[in-house]
Image (cartoon, helix red, strand yellow):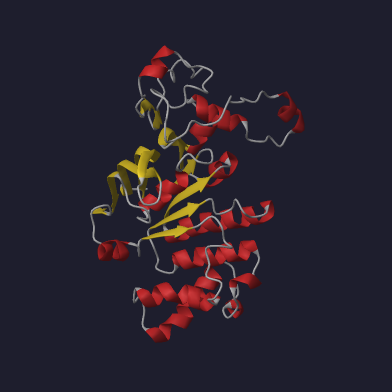
Amino acid sequence: MAGPILELRDVRTYFPVTHGFLLRRHLGTVKAVDGVTLSVARGEVLGLVGESGCGKSTLARTIMQLVPTTGGTVVLEGKNLTTGSAAGVREVRRDLQMVFQDPYASLNPRMTVFDTLAEPLRVHGVCPPPEVPARVAALMQRVGLAPRFLQKYPHEFSGGQRQRIAIARALALEPKVIIADEPVSALDVSIQAQILNLLAQLVRQMNLSLIFIAHDLAVVKHISDRVAVMYLGKIVELGRAADVIERPRHPYTRALVSAIPIPNPDQERSRQRIVLPGDPPSPIDPPAGCAFHPRCPHAQEICKAAVPPLAAFEPGRDVACVRAGALSD
């Protein structure tokens, strides 16, 4: 892995909350993504984890410029996507593609598989029209599907096959970065393993950079080089996958890791789960100081007053917690 291919600098994505139709009143602001700074190296797999509602999918759509940024910058190979024109962003999308969570909703039911995979090739003029059928057939083979299925429609496939088609569509333009937004959460466990192995194989073969979003830390550890843990729109821990999962430093990461099932029944029965009280705070009215302090079993008065920055805790590990050092043993 060399230098970063994708950089996020203090990215913020806010949504206004209004009431009324003719006379709209501003009631507040949802801070879905609130000051995220990240980088992804060439050929790296970055896992992004957190509870539902923490802002993972919004961050993915912000990187893709499917939703506008409120502040900060998204830079892909030196090109600032947040200040570029619509035509410029469209051109950059050849290098930045996304695999969505639901394979049943991400494919157009009125288009055959061939049309689905051929469309990006035609729109971006990747190859001459006579070469499109061969390129499409090669894409099908790359994701483990037979070209004879090209004239079928999405409803004729299983969930795993549809997700393979969605991955093939993302690969059509030979991108440099792919964002996979929970690509296996809607699939059976056996199919999940096949899709994960396919993604890992594609990363190696094509030297892709991958942002892999998921809830399951065990899945993230299997495929990721580094892991970023997100809570209420902020990154609270970032480091190498094995380090973050085997030696978590942030109390929130510790709670997530404690929920990973252990294959050994005896160890599973004897271990102690960390159960967090209450629900995540509202992103419309987050608490003062550290957003996690109302649920944190180690919170102190300083946690209620100051927002902890994501700072270096040890080489290759960043933690946003003033008590990370005290909890490290």
Residue 247 in view? no
Residue 77 spot, x, y in % from top left: 28, 54
Residue 13 in view? yes
Q: Quadrant of residue 312?
A: top left
**Left or right, residue 174 beside residue 71:** right
Residue 203 spot, x, y in % from top left: 47, 56
Q: Residue at x 54, y 55 (%)?
A: 101
**Left or right, residue 20 beside residue 214:** left
**Is residue 175 placed above or below 150 in the rendered structure?**
above
Residue 182 spot, x, y in % from top left: 53, 50
Residue 241 spot, x, y in % from top left: 49, 38
Q: Residue at x 59, y 53 (%)?
A: 184
**Is residue 238 placed above or below 47 in the rendered structure?**
above
Q: Nearer the viewer, residue 145 or 201?
A: 145
Q: Residue at x 76, y 28 (%)?
A: 266
- Which residue is situated farthest in the bottom direction here? 130
Q: How many marks?
A: 0
- Which residue is situated farthest in the right direction here? 266
**Is residue 82 placed above or below 138 in the rendered structure?**
above
Q: Residue at x 40, y 66 (%)?
A: 174
Q: Nearer the viewer, residue 245 or 62?
A: 62
**Left or right, residue 108 beside residue 173:** right
- Which residue is situated farthest in the front direction here? 22
**Left or right, residue 140 beside residue 289:** right
Q: Nearer the viewer, residue 80 or 303?
A: 303
